[in-house]
Image (spheres, rainbow, N blue to C red):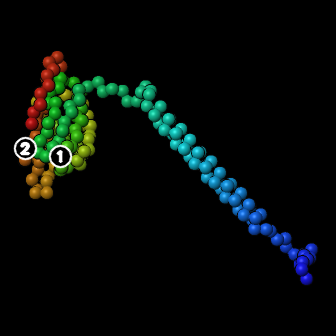
Amino acid sequence: MGSAQKSPGDAPTYSRRAERHRHQQAKARRGLILRIAAVVVVVAAVVVLIVALAGGGDDSSSTPAYAGSTVTLSLSDYAITGNLTVPAGPARIVATNVGGLPHNIGVRGVKISRNLNRGESTTLDLGVLAPGTYELYCDVIGADKVSHVAKGMVAKLIVTPADATTSTTLK
């Protein structure tokens, strides 16, 4: 009456204390696994960062410096500004749209760029330029159906003989 006897086929019973101990051990193992995973992720991120920062040191395989003249231009709404005098020889234009409207840059009879949105830049290789005056222009047609050329978005690029270099800014 006072004590219940177990038969050999009954499943073992566990005390609440033992159950709580097993639960705490499992919880501790999960916590340890999560901490190890976090450390691995942090170490991997640090390695990636170090490799990325160290990768920029050797420029021997990068594009060589441009040997010609670079005309740096800003394209604002209906104006082209920048260094507009270069010596004869290889030349390129690096143009940035600083205006609110789309713009492009062209050199009459040579080349024209794609349209640039605000903040976009382009490089336009002009080849070898002979001394003379070249017209720069933007031929975008505005929402009002009027071209930017008609609104005065033109400038003159002056190419001097190779031995006479000066720099001016025109609009």
Q: Residues within 10 Å of mark 2 (few under 14, many from 20)?
A: some
Picture quadrant where residue 64 is located:
top left
12 relative to 145, above or below = below
Marks 1 and 2, Cα distance to the nearest angstrom?
14 Å
Q: Callout 2: helix, strand or loop?
A: loop
Report x, y in % for residue 150: 7, 47
Q: Nearer the viewer, residue 83 or 155?
A: 83
Q: Is residue 109 above or below residue 87?
A: below
Screen quadrant of the C terminus: top left
User: Which x, y percent locates residue 75?
Assistant: 17, 41
Quick one: 157 or 49, which is closer to the camera?
49
Residue drawn at x 87%, y 75% is 10
The three-letter code of the residue at mark 2 reads Gly
- Identify the residue at the far bottom of this view: 1
> x, y (%) of residue 149?
10, 45
Q: Which residue is mark 1?
A: 99
Does residue 66 show up?
yes
Q: Nearer the viewer, residue 76 or 67?
A: 76
From the viewer's perspective, tell me whether residue 105 is left or right of residue 22.
Answer: left
Amino acid type at mark 1: Gly
Looking at the rendered structure, the secondary structure element under dot 1 is loop
* Residue at (11, 50) in percent of width and height: 147
Please give the residue where the numbered disc 2 appears in the rendered image. 152
Q: Quadrant of the N terminus?
A: bottom right
Extreme residue toward the top, this view: 163
Q: x, y percentage for residue 40?
A: 59, 45
The answer to which quarter of the image holds residue 44 is top right
